Amino acid sequence: MMCPREPISRRQFLWGALKAGVLAFCGAALYPILRYLTPPRGSEASVSSTVAGKVGELAANSAKIFRFGNRPGLLVNTPDGQLKAFSAVCTHLNCTVQYGAENSVIWCACHNGKFDLNGQVISGPPPRPLEAYQVNIRGEDIVVSKAS
Amino acid sequence: MSSKRLRDFLCARYELGALKAMVSHKTVPHHRHSFWYYWGGVTLLLIGIQIASGVLLLLYYRPSAQEAFASVRFIMTKVQFGWLVRSVHAWAANLAIFSAMVHLASVFFLKAYRPPRELTWVTGVCLLFLLMGFGFTGYLLPWNTLAFFATKVGTEIAGIVPGVGPVMQVFLRGGSDVGDVTLTRFFWLHIMILPLGLMGLMGLHVLMVQLQGMSQPLSVREERTIPFFPNFFLRDLVAWAMVLGVVLSVSVYWPATLGEQADPFGPTPAGIEPEWYFLWMFQTLKLFPGHILGIEGELIAVGLTGVAGLALMLVPWWDRPAREGKSHWLVTVAGIIGLAYVIGMTGYAVWIGRHP
Amino acid sequence: MNAQQRGITRIGAVLSMAVMLPSVAVAADSCVECHKQWESGSSDPTQVIDQDVHFQRGLSCADCHGGDPKATEAEAAMDKAQGFLGRPARQDIPQLCARCHAEPTYMRKYNPNLPTDQYAKYLTSQHGKRNSQGDSDVAVCTSCHQAHGIRSKKDPFSPVYAANIPGTCAECHSNAALMDRHGLPVNQHWDYAQSVHGQALLVRGDRGAPHCASCHGSHEASKPGTIAIGNVCAQCHGLTRDLFAKSPHKAAHDALGLPECEVCHGNHLIKKPTDDMLGTGSGAVCISCHEPGSKGYQSAQQMRETIEQLKAQILNGEAVVKQAAELGMDMGDAEYALHDANTKLTQTRTYVHAFSPEAMQAPAQEGLHGAQQAEQEGKNAIHEFQFRRQGLWLTLLILILLVGGLLLVIREMESPPKSRR
């Protein structure tokens, strides 16, 4: 009936349980730390300035959409090689604008609103110019920031 | 058993016997005020959490005005459990200062600073000031609007101190105004200079406690004690586990927020407030009249705060009755008034903040 | 006349005035001097003349009315023999203004950018045609620009400032007695003010929004006419018009002699288009031509479904993302994707004007994809949030067990030896 092995004392059992508890807690603490140390996916996002691209990435008379906070921005390399950046949110109905290389204008596919390379409205329904951003070169990066 | 073999290995090489004997002979008084003995240990644990979480934050944080905010945001949103690490760091910082204050108050009222423990008290008070320094410098590091302007105001106050004030202000700011350089300096202070001071002082403080043991309050007559190990140590563990639970719970349910990125050229937003442990000083400054007897009110307020700090540090020397093992009611009343003032002013500042 | 002579004349004028009315101030123009004495109403000529662009550039009363502003006596100043015109006849006003405003060499001295074809255009307008027939009801220059105190059209107080134009036209076109005489309706201004354009211009102050003259012309004001209406709208809504022009509707409208945009959107009362206008429901404009069972009827149904499907998916995504954001999760990526999906929804709505269900598919599918992605990210975030709390409770459970164990150990250790066996 009785267990033939030497019975463990209450005290030994408690100490054992305690050690197990401490180990369990260490595990619970270690898990988030290990996850924290794993390099995260994706790059940093900041609201007031962001790296929009690399120098030399854009040919003259071309443009790219970059992410600026929660909204898209448009980085344009003008036909004469000047870098300009604007909010890519059309002032008419918030569509994302794009660059039309054939006539060097920024245009919105939703209602064919057109903006010149200073963000001013050329034609179409947009009521206001596009918000312009500052462009700076930092090393290899093209840094776009909100004009302050 | 491998742990036994390790023990044998070490014992053969180092005189661990003395250490073991010291630990096993160490006792802790056991009486109705024993509860207050745990706050030092709790502060120690919280500082340990700060070191661990701080080291983790360093992995992704970038100390520059351009990147600081974005990198903290990155930690909060992109890094796995980054939100937890930052929240724990923010919460444990506040709790560490709170528990250090409780520890200080309990030591004061139980008169544990009596000889031969004067230096333990002095190092303890210095440690509290250091923790406040950690709070002040750490507050700026996320580079958000609130922190930026609070730092502006805080360093402004430092400049009031006659003589060394302007020099200290320029030293803290790294220039005439708060900016990119200030962030670098605060970062330097927060992760290098203050930690070095903390390690030294804390080592000294804990060593002195170990050498002299815990003080028995004057009002306790019986001489009951319990062994430090394992009886008191296990109780310490209970307190630590509970504090850990509190830190984790508040960090998950009320995670640290980030706010808006600081704009050095933007207008000062309404409701700029320092951390809660500076509120009482902040409120004193606000309430002080512009001029008293031809001296600038701010100067007097800063001077009085300095005098209060010095008086606090020198308690073991001016409380003469305690040196002779007697308790004087005047000292206790002074302590109560001081405590009531700090609590009252903090409460008033919070109330004013909510009802402008 | 040299400066000295002019000075003497001035002194003479002042002296002669001083004899009559002692309070007169010094000024060069005796017309203004004298007329000010009895013109005290806030819109009287001498009260508003200071704001007049002509007066500000050195022209005086006499340049329109004739007479001699240097004469000190009323009879001499307003001598018909000396060319004083008096009040010009209403019918003659356009011609009077055109003396200068149709003269390019003269106008260039003052404002090189100002066109000089207003009079020519006016003659082609309904106003101009009827004016030359002797109809005194119609607008002449002063009806819109005022007679005295004429301001630049860029001046916000000018009646021809963009935001003021609808009100200026309405002064006559909302006058029932006047319009009745010509069999014209009076509800245009009311309709316009309710319209999407009127709201943009009059309520939001968006000066890019069209006013009466944007479609009807100003000096050449007339009805656009059935053929021109598409071109009028295309001034701003170019892409929509292009899609329409390539659509099967173009030929159908032409064959039936129907205007383009107006058939569905109306003219003055152009409301912000709703999705209800599309499809086969009660508010749908499609069913006024397309019979149930016809191909067009089915297409209308299909196009509406495409839009509804995209809208529903975006709403789903937004709801989930909002829920996650309220839980304190960062939803930057998902909000970005939703913004993109909304762009595609707007684009899909524009492509309705190609009137073929296939043309809408490309933007609609991209929008659907973006909204689904946002919804998934929102769900992941909510899941993550729950995971955080579960993780906390698991950790707390371990801590509670640890505390319980510690307390048991302490009790066991410190209990009197007799209870230990």
Image (cartoon, rainbow, N blue to C red):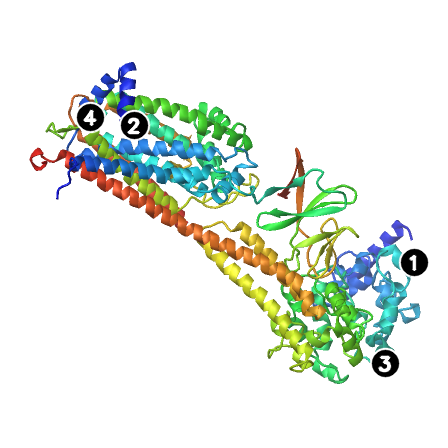
Q: CA distance from mark 2 to mark 4?
A: 19 Å
Compared to residue C26, the image places residue B254 above or below, namely above
Q: Which residue is mark 4?
A: B215
Q: Which residue is mark 2?
A: B312
C416 to the left or right of B215? left
* Location of residue C70 by image quarter: bottom right
A68 to the left or right of B162? right
Q: Position of residue C233 (x, y in %)?
A: 75, 68
Pointer 4 local density, CA inside 10 Å: few below 14, some 14–19, many at least 20: some
Pointer 2 local density, CA inside 10 Å: few below 14, some 14–19, many at least 20: some
Whether residue B10 is visible to the viewer of this picture, yes or no, is yes
Q: Which residue is mark 1?
A: C105
Q: Between residues C392 and B12, which one lies in front from this camera angle?
A: B12
Which residue is pictured at 29% across the width and 26% down the height? B2
Compared to residue B61, the image places residue C209 above or below, namely below
- Which label belongs to residue C71? none
Q: CA distance from mark 1 to mark 4?
A: 106 Å
Which residue is pictured at 86% across the width and 64% down the height? C62
Q: Are marks 4 and 3 in contact (CB under 8 Å)?
A: no
Closer to the chain start, of discs 2 and 4, is 4
Q: Chain of mark 3?
A: C
